[in-house]
Image: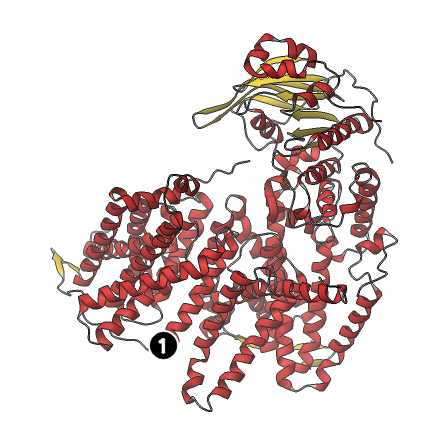
């Protein structure tokens, strides 16, 4: 039961974690995140790295789509832009501390270009435009061999931190995790200021937003820019993680994956983004484990793994949209309400 | 133009393109029907096409049912599936924002695609029986494959039947009324829910027919589903809610794609529809014949 | 820091001037050469039957419609071709007929959006937050709490989502948001539509306070004749996209054209049998 939650100043009221209990949990979480890699094997560390990357990418998409209402079917392509930029720069010896923001910037710039039509078109039409951009960018990835290595792909040298090469999943984790945390906090801050509020206003009722002095094109482009920036950084980290990628990674399927993540998790919520990313990261692993288990009595099971994944993804998206449109966040809120009010009923 | 320019080549590409465009117009019709009826772009259209083709293959080749009966059976099956989808998934979501419905069709595409892969095998390419006569047509020295001619004629026939249906039958008119102004149509006694379900069933059937035709020409594989996304260029150029637009734009895009494939190669051809989409969205978003949406303030 | 302003309507140069506005939608002529001016610090009411063009007039002044003829001048400047957000930055605020709050946000966040043009943070400073962004946010919060939330008596709902509020409260929040803009001109589109007696009196009191304490020029579309006659300094009657009468409430009430076109029996009903709204200070 939550009691004694008094705010005695506006600063306190506006803080992200106002209560001491929340800050306690936060401290515990930070400790867990720091110590985590030391107690687990390579596989789990790898999943954790992938989770961090997914969280960053999904956050970018949620800012664009969940908070600002700009539907993007091309998020994977922007990740690809970040990844290929990273490959290009890292191969030329640029240190990761510069490569990360530059890759993000490259993706962000492209995001602004793709977002330009949002001046004249909205909703469904904008979604189709991003879909076209997705296909065109993958085409460029496949054909511009001199820069992207074409269909065969490209390799990325390991990131170097103070002379150490981050070669295995355990070490790359310490590159990915702080970046993810920083970007999450930055996203949260965005929505404590006029920029974030403008995004939400555009989503809810853009005519009213204009009447309040919000320049729609400016802020829509800003949403595209920041969303693609996050995708670019995620793509860059992906490059340092896998160290070899091909264009086939950044297809429409991945864009839909991220859309599913933010819908399952909860549109327009950062906590929802985390839930969704965790869910969508663990799901393929869970499927793989259960299918390999099922081969005990159905030997042909592994061949249907990819179809199973497709079916489960699709059903998940449909299921959540029909039954729980606010996603896992709503489930979480219900649980929280129960504990806040306990022993009283909701 | 240099005197030794190969006019026959141009004529062949153009003819092929226009004929292919007819098929694209048919697929576009499926999109337009759904958009007019329910205001969404059905991103699962490719999967409906696949369902039609795979159902037909199962009935005709695997079960040995004669072609015509198999055709009717598979169309009925697709109509049933569409009706179920509309009832179970789309009806509960009516009134929700665009992104939800868009995502649902994407989820549907994924689930259906996975289901098809699981049942019929994802890596397998099946050979369809010879449904369309292959006897070619010669206009002078210009070679036109028979299959293309027949696919065009079939597509044109289906489009014609639907156009007449919408224009002259009572149900057709009620569907148009419900699409244009559901509240007024409801007040006038049109069963708006039924027309929406019917719209989805028609769109599914149209997709299924198109899928069978495409499979007859290019054989049956999961790549069939990707054809539909390319047709997005047709509906964007023609206008999301215009059947006339679908026809005109289908022919134009078919022509453009064929010429590109012929002179610039297959890979460039694959990207042409998406470049066209971006260009049109930048200069004339509602397409050639689409109705401009006016926002009430 | 309290907003200073004249304690009684001052007759000065018009702060908002509309000249011979013509607006067509396809074949429909929404505005047919309408002119009006709002003097600084006054409450100008715009009345007329449904479909007369009143909201179209507001939308043209706001900047959503480009007129086919005529001009809109704001503080002497020709803003006819300015975008809507630019006019807002110049000090033009408005509320909407159907409340246009942002349903995904709390009352406080909605009101803070009113202060958008007076803040400066961009993407980078917003993401960093500490420093200038935080300072201006806190300053805005204080200002809104002291000047707007207390003024409109909505402190008890400030953290609630607007989606659950009653209609009357929503209208008040919309007014709060407009006030947070510190506007020079405030356009209210049917501020008391759908309100009961008590809510109407509250809103009338707020509007008068806005005029007196903030010195804001108010433009008002209303059908509630009692309200219009009691609080306006100046009334413009619009029909078929034209102004068919103007003057003080008393003058307009007596104008035979106006009576014929619009007021009819309502003129007798609104005749002085006592003020419809009590002035409370």
x, y percentage for residue C221?
A: 64, 25
Residue closest to the eye, B85 or B262: B85
What count of labels does the image hold?
Answer: 1
Between residue A14 and residue B188, name the one nearer to us: B188
Q: Residues within 10 Å of mark 1 (few under 14, many from 20)?
A: few
Task: Please state the horizontal and vertical placement of residue A294, each as a whole percent of the image.
Answer: 48, 87
Residue under label 1, please give it: B119
Measuring 33% from the left and 78% from the top, which residue is drawn there? Answer: B124
Q: Is residue B250 above or below residue C15?
A: below
Residue occupying image coordinates x 80% and y 39%: C153
Determine whether the residue tagged by mark 1 lies in a helix, strand or loop. Answer: helix
Left or right, A117 with respect to A342, comes to: left
**Position above or below: C40 against B31:** above
Q: Is C60 located above or below residue C169 in the figure?
A: above
Q: Is residue C15 left or right of residue B160?
A: right
Residue drawn at point x = 38 percent, y = 46 percent: B239
Q: Is residue C139 left or right of residue B90?
A: right
Can residue A189 be seen here? The reply is: yes
Q: B123 or B159, which lies in front?
A: B159
């Amino acid at each position: 039961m939550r009691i004694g939650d008094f705010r005695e100043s506006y600063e306190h009221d506006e803080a992200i974690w106002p209560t001491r209990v929340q800050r306690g949990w936060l401290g515990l979480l930070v400790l867990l995140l720091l110590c985590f890699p030391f107690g687990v094997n390579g596989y789990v560390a790898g999943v954790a790295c992938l989770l961090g990357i997914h969280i960053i990418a999904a956050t970018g998409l949620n800012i664009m789509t969940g908070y600002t209402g700009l539907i993007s079917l091309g998020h994977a392509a922007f990740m690809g832009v970040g990844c290929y930029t990273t490959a290009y720069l890292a191969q030329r010896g640029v240190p990761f501390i510069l490569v990360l923001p530059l890759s993000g910037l490259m993706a962000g710039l492209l995001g602004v270009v793709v977002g330009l039509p949002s001046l004249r078109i909205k909703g469904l039409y904008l979604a189709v435009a991003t879909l076209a951009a997705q296909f065109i960018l993958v085409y460029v990835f496949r054909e511009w061999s001199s820069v992207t290595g074409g269909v065969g792909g490209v390799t990325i040298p390991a990131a170097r931190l103070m002379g150490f090469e981050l070669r295995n999943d355990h070490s790359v984790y310490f590159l990915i995790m702080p970046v993810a945390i920083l970007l999450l906090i930055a996203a949260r801050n965005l929505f404590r200021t006029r920029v974030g509020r403008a995004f939400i206003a555009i989503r809810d009722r853009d005519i009213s937003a204009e009447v309040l002095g919000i320049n729609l094109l400016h802020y829509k482009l800003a949403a595209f820019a920041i969303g693609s920036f996050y995708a670019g950084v995620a793509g860059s980290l992906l490059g340092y993680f896998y160290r070899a990628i091909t264009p086939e990674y950044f297809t429409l399927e991945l864009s839909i994956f991220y859309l599913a993540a933010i819908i399952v998790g909860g549109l327009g919520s950062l906590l929802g983004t985390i839930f969704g990313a965790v869910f969508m990261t663990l799901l393929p692993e869970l499927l793989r484990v259960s299918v390999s288990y099922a081969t005990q009595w159905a030997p042909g099971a592994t061949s249907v793994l990819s179809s199973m994944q497709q079916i489960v993804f699709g059903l998940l998206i449909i299921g959540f949209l029909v039954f729980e449109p606010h996603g896992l966040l709503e489930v979480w809120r219900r649980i929280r309400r129960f504990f806040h009010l306990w022993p009283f009923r909701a | 133009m240099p005197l030794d320019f190969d006019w026959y080549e141009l004529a062949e590409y153009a003819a092929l393109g226009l004929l292919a465009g007819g098929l694209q117009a048919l697929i576009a019709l499926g999109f337009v029907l759904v958009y007019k009826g329910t205001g969404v772009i059905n991103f699962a259209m490719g999967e409906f096409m696949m369902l039609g083709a795979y159902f037909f293959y199962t009935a005709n080749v695997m079960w040995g049912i004669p072609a015509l009966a198999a055709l009717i059976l598979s169309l009925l099956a697709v109509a049933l599936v569409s009706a179920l989808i509309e009832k179970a998934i789309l009806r509960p979501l009516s009134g929700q924002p665009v992104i939800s419905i868009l995502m649902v069709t994407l989820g549907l595409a994924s689930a259906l695609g996975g289901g098809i892969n699981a049942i019929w095998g994802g890596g397998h390419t099946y050979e369809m029986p010879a449904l369309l006569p292959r006897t070619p047509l010669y206009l002078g020295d210009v070679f036109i494959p028979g299959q293309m001619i027949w696919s065009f004629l079939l597509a044109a026939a289906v489009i014609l039947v639907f156009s007449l249906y919408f224009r002259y039958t009572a149900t057709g008119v009620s569907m148009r009324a419900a699409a244009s102004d559901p509240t007024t149509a409801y007040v006038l006694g049109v069963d708006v829910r039924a027309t929406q379900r019917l719209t989805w069933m028609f769109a599914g059937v149209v997709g299924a027919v198109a899928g069978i035709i495409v499979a007859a020409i290019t054989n049956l594989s999961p790549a069939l589903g990707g054809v539909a996304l390319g047709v997005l260029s047709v509906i964007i150029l023609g206008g999301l809610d215009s059947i006339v637009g679908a026809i005109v734009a289908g022919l134009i895009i078919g022509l453009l794609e064929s010429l590109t494939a012929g002179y610039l190669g297959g890979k460039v051809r694959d990207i042409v529809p998406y470049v066209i989409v971006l260009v049109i969205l930048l200069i004339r978003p509602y397409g050639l014949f689409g109705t401009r949406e006016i926002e009430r303030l | 820091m309290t907003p200073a302003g004249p304690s009684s309507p001052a007759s000065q140069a018009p702060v908002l001037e509309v000249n011979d506005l013509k607006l067509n939608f396809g074949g429909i002529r929404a505005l047919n050469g309408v002119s009006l001016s709002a003097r600084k610090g006054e409450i100008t009411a715009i009345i007329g039957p449904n479909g007369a063009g009143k909201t179209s007039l507001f939308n043209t002044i706001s900047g959503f419609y480009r007129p086919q003829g005529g001009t809109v001048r704001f503080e002497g400047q020709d803003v006819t071709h300015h975008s809507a957000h630019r006019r807002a930055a110049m000090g033009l605020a408005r509320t909407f007929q159907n409340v246009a709050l942002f349903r995904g946000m709390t009352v406080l966040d909605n009101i803070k959006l009113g202060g958008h043009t007076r803040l400066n943070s961009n993407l980078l400073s917003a993401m960093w937050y500490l420093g200038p962004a935080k300072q201006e946010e806190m300053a805005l919060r204080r200002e809104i709490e002291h000047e707007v939330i207390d003024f409109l008596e909505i402190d008890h709902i400030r953290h609630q989502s607007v989606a659950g509020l009653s209609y009357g409260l929503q209208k008040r929040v919309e007014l709060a948001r407009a006030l947070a803009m510190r506007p020079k001109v405030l356009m209210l589109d049917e501020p008391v539509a759908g309100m009961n007696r008590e809510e109407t009196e509250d809103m009338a009191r707020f509007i008068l306070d806005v005029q007196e304490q903030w010195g804001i020029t108010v433009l008002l579309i209303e059908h509630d004749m009692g309200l219009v006659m009691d609080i306006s300094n100046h009334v413009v009657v619009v029909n078929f996209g034209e102004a068919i009468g103007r003057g003080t409430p008393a003058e307009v009430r007596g104008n035979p054209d106006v009576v014929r076109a619009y007021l009819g029996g309502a003129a007798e009903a609104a005749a002085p049998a006592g003020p419809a709204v009590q002035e409370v200070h």
